[in-house]
Every structure is written in C-alpha cells, then in structure tokens.
Amino acid sequence: MTCRLLLVDDHSLIRAGVRALIADVPGYQVVGEAEDGDQLLSLVSSLAPDIVLLDLSMRSTSGLDALTQLRAAGASCQVLILSMHSDPETIMRALEAGAHGYLLKDSTATELEQALRALRNNERYLSPAVAHTVINQALQRTQAACERHNLTARQLEILRLIVRGKSTREIASGLGLSIKTVETHRSQLMKRLQIYDVAGLVLYAVREKIITLDD
C-alpha cells in the first residue's frame, strides 16, 4: 500500500524539494501541503495522511503548537519533524509533544527515506547527527528525576510501566527480569514514596510529570 504524506512548511522551496525527493522513493505519495500550522488539523481530517512531515519554525502557529493540537485532537497519524534546530531541548520538547521522529533539514535523501520507513513501521527515528545529544539529555533528565523522587533508575522505569497498566509479569518479560525482582523493586518504590496502591502511583506520576495522561 502507498503511504500517504502531508508536508507542512512555510517555505515553498523546502516543500518542493522534499516533494521531489519523495517522488523518487517507491511506496510514498504526497497528498497535500500546508504553509502554516493552522491548516494542519483540517488537512489531517480531510486527507487522512499516514505521516505528517512538520516544520517547527513557521509563521502564525508554530509546529510545536500545531503538534500539541494534533495530539489533543486524537489524530493517529505519525509525525516526522523536519527542522534546522539541533539543540537537544527543542528536540526533546518535540518528542514529548508527540513527534515520532526528528530529521534535520540538511540530512541526505537516504536519511529521509530511512526516517519514513521507520515511521511507516511504527518505529521512531532520530537524525544520527542529534541522536547522541538527545540520549545524553534523556539520561540527564532521568538522573535528575531519580534524585528528585529518591528512586533508582530501575525503580523509575518500573513506576512508569506500572502506571501504564502493565502487570508484574509483563514488566518482568519486557525488562528481562524475574517476577520476584520486579516485585522487590515495586515494593521498594512504594515504600520510598509512601504510596501503596496503583491509583495513588498514577496520580503521583502525573502530578510530578513522570508520565503524562497521553502516554
């Protein structure tokens, strides 16, 4: 099946260039274009794209605001950010807002094809040029969260899985741990937080922004 794409960028030359690159990649079709984030929701509704290629810096509604609105509306399409911004904070904000991939505008045609293929397969994609800095940023945030909540990195990871509704068996299987080890971590984190029920853990995790309601 052909993967349907929507281009959103306020520079017509950028859109033309991306469209030309995609024309050479079998299995993809650009079904629409927009020059502003304000048009995104209506076009997603009318065109039903599988992947939206979205710029962050646009006139009127920014790409980040448009992405937030898109996720709030419950749209199921994948979103690939195309941006010139390579600072880790901007990238993390885009990923946290619901982007599935982040590609720098100076990337090669091969990288664009790899990114599209990843999203089409429900995988995430980061430009190799920014992957290292994003990983470091994520590790720093995890360390800060661990220190703030007095939890180990493993306990924080298990907490996130618990509040997502995963059972002890599912957590053990997903992390490659024994059920007994997961139960021990679960008991220890509950004791440290002084919260002994799942509902309380969910409220705590949302209040402390360990996890969002959209996760």
Image (tube, rainbow, N blue to C red):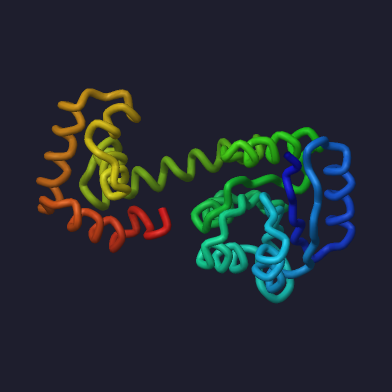
- How many numbered dots are placed on residues in this image? 0
Q: Residue at x 56, y 49 (%)?
A: 88
Image coordinates of residue 48 in percent, x first then y, are 68, 58
Image coordinates of residue 77 in percent, x first then y, are 61, 53
- Viewer-side residue, 157 vs 40: 40
Q: Quadrant of the N terminus?
A: top right
* In the image: residue 24, left or right of residue 152: right
Q: Residue at x 75, y 42 (%)?
A: 2
Q: Is residue 80 above or below residue 37?
A: above
Image coordinates of residue 40 in percent, x first then y, are 68, 67
Q: Residue at x 41, y 53 (%)?
A: 215
- Viewer-side residue, 174 vs 60: 174
Q: Quadrant of residue 32?
A: bottom right
Q: Residue furthest bottom?
A: 60
Q: Is residue 111 above or below residue 179?
A: below
Q: Quadrant of residue 94?
A: bottom right
- Viewer-side residue, 43 vs 134: 43
Q: Residue furthest front?
A: 1
Q: Residue at x 15, y 33 (%)?
A: 183
* In the image: residue 50, left or right of residue 160: right
Image coordinates of residue 104 in percent, x first then y, are 71, 46
Q: Quadrant of residue 6?
A: bottom right
* In the image: residue 195, left or right of residue 3: left
